[in-house]
Amino acid sequence: MKRLLSVACCVLLALGIGSLAFASGVLRMTEAWPTYIDPAIGSDLSSSLAFVNLYDSLVYPDSTGTPQPHLASSWEVSDDALTWTFHLRDDVVFHDGTPLTAEDVVFSLERLQLIGQGYAYLFASVAGAEAIDDHTVRFSFEQPSGVFLASLFRLYVVNKDLVLANLESNGPYGEMGDYGTGYLLLHDAGSGPYQVKDFRLEEELIMERNAGYWIPFDSDCPDEFHLIGTTEPTTVRTMISRGELEIADFRQPQENIASMEQLDGIDVAEYFTGYSLYGMMHTQKAPTDDAHFRRAMALAVDYATMIDMIFPGSRTLTSPVPSSVPGSAVVADYSQNMDQARQELALSKYADCLDDYPVEIHWCAEVPDEEKVALLFMANMAELGITVNVVKVPWMSMIDEMASIETSPNVITVYTEPHYAEAGSVLESRYHSNSAATWEQNEWLLDPELDEAIESALATVDRSDRFSQYEEIQTYLADLCPSLCFFEQVKRQAYQASYVNWPAANGDVVPVMGYNFAARFIQVFDH
């Protein structure tokens, strides 16, 4: 143990963290990487967390996920729901002092749509945007959108002039060159409450308070927010025990969380946000291309042991959409039933040649407890006569392999979380063809009928009708069984309760990915 601790201390010194112990006004948190701070590129938790602090959006979610005025003080929608007009505040400036105008909003949308990464899929239905004047922006649609307002949580406004001043000529975007992606790899172009002070890729993102922010800060909000690129359990426990870390990432093994909870001044926050673990099954690769085979595996999984022993406090899923997300429906019973599993397997075209078709499952190296899930899955499948090969893969390698239908494995364990508080967010980001080749879909469904159903639901303005369509889609997916819906995880994060006042730990939880780590709402007291 002494040797492990000494190694951990060396890691801390290498990251340049040790000298910051007990630093007043500094909030430090560990998180898995990569972190992309370009809002046209990133979409995972670490990136979204950065966006929330570095950038502003037209609307902001409250504790129910309902959009509230932010950059936009008000808005109107036309009777046919094809035109949305937003009126911007006139007192917002970017970090370099440039006033934020409607032109910046239009530029941010067009840049996101052309680059086509990150959250671009949320705005595929927007036909165009125009700046009516400096503080009025209008969006037009060819068909209505029932979720556009909530989607605007993910349209982070960038400084047009700053991006254009930092274009690299060699790039894939025509006259826009690299469209500023090189510059925004390490710098921000936002107006948010924090701005980039220093960014060492794969090590640490340091954000400092924006003194000119248009919303007043509480005096106890942190002056700096450090996002530290490690989830290594021994390192995290050492840091928090030495007062060199305020909030630990929620990817820690349960035994490490329990150990940290025993430390003086440390509490563990527990909350749900729709964060769920899936075994994403490749529906275009043998043997998981067979629906009966997939159903057999889903019926053989020991969900109860996962929830009771590996991730205690988590919830059973009753749909591909977690129950905490509005619009989720009860359409499936994800519990182990070996008799039914054998019946389904007997109907599979692979039933008589199982030895010829082993299943490969990849789990994320940065989340040690996922190995336990993968090994339990392997044991469960062995009872059916299915051979499973378990492979440990770093997160960045997972992203790379899911980018190609040829390199994606049979099963990959991935957590996802809603990008806005409605079932449509999960259905679109997880199962629409537009999300194939991203980290959110290893299923490779490429199902035009399903795509049309999702698009129809998202275009439905009436909430009740939209939710009815969501339920039909969830029923379809439950029968198709493209995913092993393991559980909705309770997020458990150790934090310095003796001097940190964190809203999520107090039950004030925002059900939108990244927003529970908005540093302007977290207080760090002198200690």
Image (tube, rainbow, N blue to C red):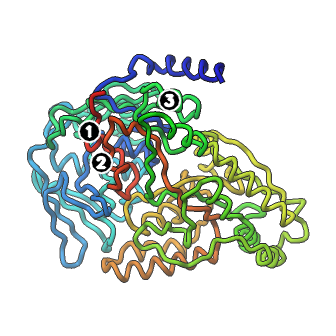
Amino acid bearing label 1: Gly
Disc 1 from disc 2: Cα separation: 8 Å
Amino acid bearing label 2: Tyr
What residue do we see at 24% from left, 56% from top?
Answer: 59
Q: Is residue 164 visible?
A: no
Q: Position of residue 322 (x, y in %)?
A: 50, 66
The residue that label 1 is drawn on is: 190
| Badge 3: residue crowd in 10 Å (few <14, some 14–19, many ≥20) | some
Disc 2 from disc 3: Cα separation: 23 Å
Q: Position of residue 182 (x, y in %)?
A: 40, 32
The residue that label 2 is drawn on is: 156
Residue at disc 1, secondary structure: loop
Disc 1 from disc 3: Cα separation: 21 Å
In front here: 125 or 402?
Answer: 402
Amino acid bearing label 3: Glu
What residue do we see at 32% from left, 49% from top?
Answer: 503
Q: Position of residue 375 (x, y in %)?
A: 75, 51
Relative vertical location of residue 504 with respect to residue 299 in this rendering, above or below: above
Q: Earlier in the sequence, mark 1 or mark 3?
A: 1
Q: Which callout, 1 or 3, points to the residue nearer the camera?
A: 3
Relative vertical location of residue 178 with respect to residue 61 in this rendering, above or below: above
The residue that label 3 is drawn on is: 202
Q: Does the CB distance between marks 1 and 2 fall below 8 Å?
A: yes
In front here: 38 or 518?
Answer: 518
In front here: 214 or 76?
Answer: 214
Residue at disc 2, secondary structure: loop
Q: Earlier in the sequence, mark 1 or mark 2?
A: 2
